[in-house]
Amino acid sequence: MTQLFGDDAFERVPRVLAPGATWVPDWLDVEQQAWIVRRFAEWADGPVPIRHPRVGAHEMSVRNVCLGRHWRPGGYSRVADDVNGRAVLPVPDWLVRLGRRAIAATGDAETAASYTPDAVLANYYDLDAHMGMHQDRDEPSGAPVVSISIGDSCTFRFGNTAGRGRPYEDIRLASGDLFVFGGPARLAFHGVVRIHPGTAPSGIGLASGRINLTLRSTGLAP
């Protein structure tokens, strides 16, 4: 069972943080999380290995492997020209189905029916990793972003569309949690403040750190 944190135990219920942004705690069970951990290990050992993306001369603390389309800050490509020039693995059908289930879990059945993610960013945060406040704006499509957390909990900061500062809200995303943001919240600034060691549930096969899958329907040409 996902470990709870003091008063957070009373807050771990589905709720809307802002119009279009929905948090669903404990969405995946331990067996489902373990399945994804095993798949992540396969992706990381795939044709394009896991790497630290770079923003200019700066190396991000997060490590990343992509499916469907290769992402680097500023856009997508079909081949990993900043790594080894190889094509990334395709988005598997089970992840498309999972993305549709995720959208449906927010109550948006109409969007769920047609949601087809064509890019997945699979990120790994070690205990020292973080991600600054940013917008996911490399996709022409306004389709929702689906975010799934596995492993150690993190402090996730969800803000506004105008800038990196306040107003924002910090929540504790635990293993198995789902977070979806679209509509008016699609371009909200968000980031990961810190990782909380030793908070992952037993049985998922991840000793430490956090895996975060973000599913995107980019709207880019096939």
Image (tube, helix red, strand yellow):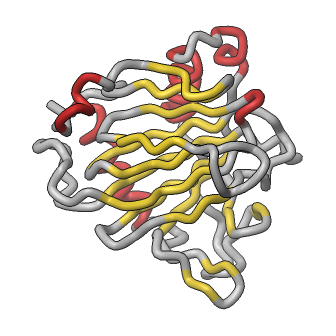
In which quadrant of the rendered image does the N terminus lie? top left
* Quarter of the view holding residue 44: bottom left
* Quarter of the view holding residue 8: top left
Extreme left residue here?
202
The residue drawn where x is 68% and y is 63% is 71
Does 179 sit left or right of 120 as displayed? left
Q: Between 6 and 68, which is closer to the camera in this rendering?
A: 6
Position of residue 2 relative to residue 66, above or below, is: above
Q: Position of residue 104 (x, y in %)?
A: 56, 15
The residue drawn where x is 70% and y is 31% is 182
Q: Position of residue 63 (x, y in %)?
A: 46, 70
Extreme front residue here?
166
Q: Position of residue 220 (x, y in %)?
A: 85, 47
All told, the count of numbered labels is 0
Position of residue 188 relative to residue 27, above or below, is: below
Does 40 sit left or right of 20 as displayed? left
Does 53 sit left or right of 79 as displayed? left
Position of residue 178 relative to residue 47, above or below, is: above
Q: Between 119 and 163, which is closer to the camera in this rendering?
A: 163
The residue drawn where x is 37% and y is 58% is 42
Q: Position of residue 35 (x, y in %)?
A: 29, 40
The residue drawn where x is 32% and y is 25% is 11
